[in-house]
Every structure is written in C-alpha cells, then in structure tokens.
Image: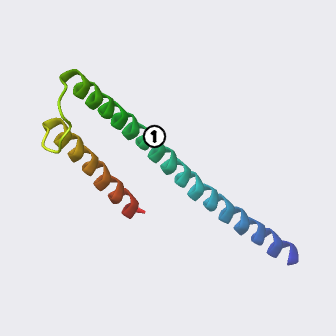
C-alpha cells in the first residue's frame, strides 16, 4: 500500500513538473517573440531617425514642430507607445 502511495505521489509530481515546464516554455516563447518585435521597432526607429537627420542636413530645413516630416515621425512614436501600452495590459 505504501509503495502505491509513493508511486502515485511521484506520478502527480511528474505531471506538475511537466505542466510547469510547459508554462515556462510558453512564457519563454512569448518573451523571445516580444524581444524580436522590440528589435524590429528599434531598427525602424533608428532608420527613421537617420532619414530625418539626412533629410534635415540635405535640405537645410529648420526642425520645427510644424515640419511634415517631424509630424509624421511624432505620430509614429505615439503609435509605438500606444502599441507598447496595449502589450503591457495583455499580460
């Protein structure tokens, strides 16, 4: 009888550990995906910022808040912030 109880406990423990491992794997996958998304967003921001600098230096434009490029860039940043906050609330 004691042997059966021990075997049942071991089986239940093994199931618990496997379920925990599956949860951790899902979390790891989600974090890797989020990391890749953030890398892409960062690359996009760097590219956009670089284009902005090149555009400004080549065109000798003053960088004011009413410049169309600045407006488009600021809207893009706001959209990234909104998508970031939505991601944080998904958890």
Left or right of 2 on screen, residue 71 = left
Quadrant of the rendered image containing residue 23: bottom right
Quadrant of the image containing the C terminus:
bottom left
Number of other residues with Cα within 10 Å of mark 1, as a class: few under 14, some 14 to 19, many 20 or more = few
Examine the rendered structure and indicate whether residue 56 appears above or below residue 22. Answer: above
Query: Which residue carries the number 1 mark?
Result: 36
What residue is rendered at 68% in x and 61% in y?
17
What residue is rendered at 25% in x and 25% in y?
57
Examine the rendered structure and indicate whether residue 59 appears above or below residue 62. Answer: above
Between 32 and 14, the one lying in front of the other is: 32
Q: Residue furthest right?
A: 2
What residue is rendered at 21% in x and 46% in y?
75
Q: Secondary structure at mark 1?
A: helix
Left or right of 54 on screen, residue 19 = right
Place of residue 21 in the rendered image (x, y in percent of width and height, measured from the top left): 63, 56
Between 27 and 68, the one lying in front of the other is: 68
Place of residue 52 in the rendered image (x, y in percent of width and height, measured from the top left): 26, 31
Examine the rendered structure and indicate whether residue 81 appears above or below residue 42. Answer: below
Quadrant of the image containing the N terminus:
bottom right
Left or right of 83 on screen, residue 28 = right
Q: What sort of colour scheme is used for the picture?
A: rainbow
Place of residue 14 in the rendered image (x, y in percent of width and height, measured from the top left): 72, 62
Q: How many marks?
A: 1
Between 44 and 23, the one lying in front of the other is: 44
Between 46 and 54, the one lying in front of the other is: 54
What residue is rendered at 40% in x and 39% in y?
42
Quadrant of the rendered image containing residue 76: top left
Place of residue 65 in the rendered image (x, y in percent of width and height, measured from the top left): 17, 45
């Amino acid at each position: 009888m004691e042997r059966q109880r021990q075997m049942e406990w071991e089986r239940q423990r093994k199931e618990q550990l496997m379920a925990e491992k599956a949860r951790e794997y899902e979390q790891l996958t989600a974090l890797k995906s989020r990391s890749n998304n953030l890398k892409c967003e960062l690359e996009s921001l760097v590219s956009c910022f670089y284009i902005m600098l090149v555009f400004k230096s080549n065109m000798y434009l003053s960088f004011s808040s009413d410049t169309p490029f600045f407006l488009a860039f600021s809207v893009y940043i706001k959209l990234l912030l909104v998508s970031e906050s939505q991601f944080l609330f998904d958890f």
